[in-house]
Image: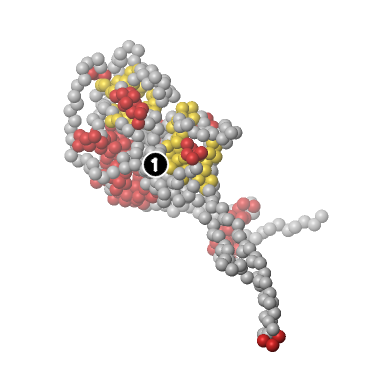
Amino acid sequence: MRRFAPLTLSLSALSRMALPRTALLHAALSLATLGLGAAPVLAAPTLSPAAAATEAAHDAAMEGYLYFYPLVTMDLTRRQFTHPSQGAQGAPANAFLHQRALPRPGAATPWANPDMLRSTAWLDLTAGPVVLSAPDTHGRLYALTLLDMWNEAFATLGKRSTGTARGNTALVPPGWTGTLPSGMPRIDAPTAYVWAKNLIQADGPADYPAVNALQDGFTVTPLAQWNLPPQSQRVKADPSLDLKIPVREQVESMPTDAFFTYAAELLRKNPPHATDQPVLAKLRRVGLIPGRPFDFDKQDHPVKQGLRRGLRAARDRMQAAAGVTLGGVNGWQRETASTGVYGNAYLRRALSAQAQPGAGLPEDLAVLLLASDSQGRPLEGAHRYTLHFASGQFPPAGALWSLAAYDGQGMPVANPLDRYALGDRDPLQYNADGSLDVVISHAAPEPGVQANWLPVAATGPVTVLLRAYAPGPALLDGLWAPPAAVRDEPVPEPLVEAEPAPATPAAAPAPAASAAPAAPPTSGKTPAAGKAPAAVKKPW
C-alpha cells in the first residue's frame, strides 16, 4: 500500500511565501487544529491601570443603569402621584384614586381598558404595616396587584388567587417584628413603598353605581390606626419635584452623576433582592454600595469616564432591545417573556418599566395586539377585516375576553353604536356550526352581522387588542393563537363585451341610369342606432 510522506510544511516556511497576514493566521489555526503545528499564543494586551478602571466602570454602569432604571422610575412615579398639587389626578399615600367610568373618545388614556374600572394607590409602610381591606364583590371579577419598588409583582388579591369574599390583609415592611390582630393574614412587602393597582369588572354605564360602591370598599388603614376613627393626613409638598415632565423623560435625560446618586439614595431605603448579589458586587467596585451615599465627584477621572460611557451604552442597549421579546402569530403580537416577575433579567425588567411600569401578572390578564392582517399588511381604517373563530377555538379565558379597537394614538374612536369593545359578554351572533365571525370596519356591515361589528376609525392606522382575563394554559404557554384578520378585497366584476348589433339591411338598388357603385361590405358590425358601445366596468 502506498504511503504518503508526512506533511512537514512549517509556519516558518509559510511565512516565506508571499501570503497575506490574514492567510498566515488561518494557516496557523488550521495547523493547530490538525495537530501539525502549534499556533503561537498571543497574549492579550495589558491595560493600563487607568484604562482598566475605565473598563470596569463602564461594565458596572451599563449593568447598573438597567438594574436601577425600574427603581428610579417607580420612585418618581410615586412622588408625582402623591404630590398634593396633583389634585384629582393623584391621591395621598395610603388612599385609592378611583377611575369611575370606562374610557370614551376624548376622555381616555392611551390603550385604556374597556372592561375594567381601575383603582390605584401608593402604600407607605415606612411607619409600620398597613391593612388593606377588600369588600365582598359577590363573585365579581377583580385583580389587585401589589408591586414593590423594583417593579416586581410580589402578591395579588382577587378572584383568581384569594377569592371575592370580604377580607383584611396586613402588608408588613421589611424587618418588622410586631404583632398583628388575631387571624389577620400577613404579606411581607419587599420594600417600604408598595404600588397597589386594582381592576374591577364593569359591564357598561348601567353597572357604574354597583362598581363604584365596590371601589369605595377598598381601603387602606395604617395598623396603628386600626379600629380607630379615620384620621386626616398631613401631606408635605416636595418643591424639588418636576410635575410637568413625564417620568420616562426625566429618567432618560438624567446626567450620569444625578442618576447614580439618586439610585444610591433609593438603594439605602429599598433593600435589594436576595438574588441581586452578582450585580451588587460589580457596583461596589465603583463606590455604589448598599446603605451608603454615592459621591460622583470623588471618583477618579477614569471611573467617571467609564460611568458616563456605560450609561450611554445601557441606553443604547435598551433602545435596540425594545420589542425583541414580542412574538407574532397570525399577525398578533404578544410578550413572549413573563411580565410582573423578572428575577435577574434586568434588561427585561427595565424595558417593562420603560414601556408600562406596574405591569401585572399574565396569569391575571394576557394582552395580544393585532398588528397586521393575514397578508402581513398593517391594519387600516379604510378596509374591512374579518376574524373567524372556529367552533371551540375561542380565547381560552377563565373569566372573560374582549376585543378593543384603537386609533393610531391608542384612543377609542367614536361610532354610532357607542361600542369600543366586543367580547363574550355581548350578545354575539354565532354561525350554525358554532363558529364566530367578528367584523372590524368603519362602515356598518349588513344588518345580520352588526352584533359582531367592532367599529374603527374611517382612515389611518388601526390597532386591536385582545384581552383574556384569567387566561388558560394554552394561551399562557403559547399553544393557542387568535385567527388572522382577513381583509375583504373588492371583487372585480367580469368584463362585459359589447353585444353585436343587427346587420344593416342592404339598400334597394337604384335605377341603372343613376346607380352609383355599390359600397363594399363592411368588415365590422356597427352598434344599433341610438346605443353606445358598452364600457368596461372597473373594480369597486
Q: Residue furthest right?
A: 1
Q: Position of residue 30 (x, y in %)?
A: 61, 55
User: For the point 32% across and 30% down, which residue is it?
Assistant: 119
Q: Nearer the viewer, residue 326 or 257?
A: 326
Q: Position of residue 528 (x, y in %)?
A: 61, 67
Q: Residue furthest bottom?
A: 513
Residue flagged by tag 1: what amino acid is it? Pro
Do we see residue 298 in this rendering? no
Q: Is residue 81 left or right of residue 319?
A: left
Q: Is residue 72 left or right of residue 399?
A: left
Give the secondary structure at mark 1. Answer: loop
Quarter of the figure with residue 365 = top left
- Residue at label 1? 416
Q: Is residue 385 above or below residue 505?
A: above
Q: Nearer the viewer, residue 452 or 372?
A: 452
Badge 1 local density, few (<14 within 10 Å), some, or many (20+)? few
Q: How many marks?
A: 1
Q: Is residue 319 above or below residue 172?
A: below
